[in-house]
Image (spheres, grey):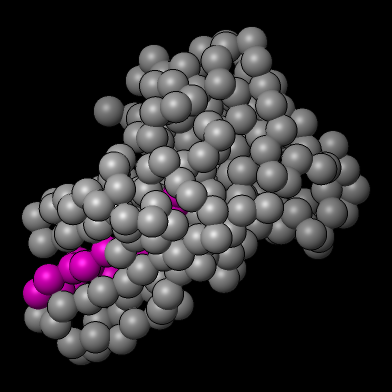
Amino acid sequence: GQQLNQSPQSMFIQEGEDVSMNCTSSSIFNTWLWYKQDPGEGPVLLIALYKAGELTSNGRLTAQFGITRKDSFLNISASIPSDVGIYFCAGHSNYQLIWGAGTKLIIKP
Amino acid sequence: NAGVTQTPKFQVLKTGQSMTLQCAQDMNHNSMYWYRQDPGMGLRLIYYSASEGTTDKGEVPNGYNVSRLNKREFSLRLESAAPSQTSVYFCASSEAAANYGYTFGSGTRLTVV
């Protein structure tokens, strides 16, 4: 079946640093989504991308829908402690979401 | 503002036991979903209901059954639990099957021993 490759698996960063993560697929998606999951909670939608080449921001978060429609990236600028959690990409195809395995963001004290 | 409510939050079952996970949403959404989340993997769709009265298999339906009881409620049943079903289960809903704004519940952590 379809798979999304999300990288990196985890990131250790200092507060204030910028963060970048990405997802790639062997298949084309019509929509790319980025979610964040806090411990003990379900994922929460951060950004949705609907068109190839689209660049969308949500506060300190910026995401892009790749031109080939097979990839997407998420950037977080000037990270803060509440940014810790697991970030998931998801691609939408045939009325189903296909999920990446997640990027765990840890901020070093 | 409850959103999506799942019960129970935690459950331990013995192999072979059965149980039903409950999910209810108060947002008048048409579509509902059941996912499982395992360490190091993304969420995998078990079953979904695009609208009241319909259910369809997702990626990993074996060992599960679902019931869309009404527009608000979508339950997931394990008839004979197996250790491989140890996971965190999430229910989600959206306005429509083609709508990408899924709202998730807080999850049910199930352990089968």
Residue at the location (30% across, 48% down)? A52
Residue B33, quarter of picture: top right
| Along the viewing direction, whichever of A9 and A38 lies nearer the viewer | A9
Q: Is residue B68 above or below residue A3?
A: above
Percent position (x, y) of residue B102?
40, 36
Residue at the location (44% across, 51% down)? A90
* Magenta highlight on residue A77: yes
Q: Is residue A90 left or right of residue A50?
A: right
User: How many numbered discs, if any?
Assistant: 0
Q: Is residue A78 left or right of residue B107?
A: left
Q: Is residue A108 left or right of residue B48?
A: left
- Asked if residue A9 can be seen in this view, the reply is yes
Percent position (x, y) of residue A1?
68, 53
Q: Is residue B68 above or below residue A31?
A: above
Quadrant housing the C terminus of chain A: bottom left
Residue at the location (39% across, 52% down)? A69
Q: Is residue A91 above or below residue B18?
A: below
Residue A12, quarter of picture: bottom left
| Along the viewing direction, whichever of B92 and B6 lies nearer the viewer | B92
* Magenta highlight on residue B14: no
Q: Is residue B49 left or right of residue B14?
A: left
- Asked if residue B8 can be seen in this view, the reply is no
Residue lying at the far front of the rendered structure: A68
Percent position (x, y) of residue A66?
32, 57
Residue B14, quarter of picture: bottom right
Percent position (x, y) of residue B2?
34, 30
Residue at the location (23% across, 58% down)? A63
| Along the viewing direction, whichever of A63 and B51 lies nearer the viewer | A63
The stretch of residues the image draws in magenta is: A74-91
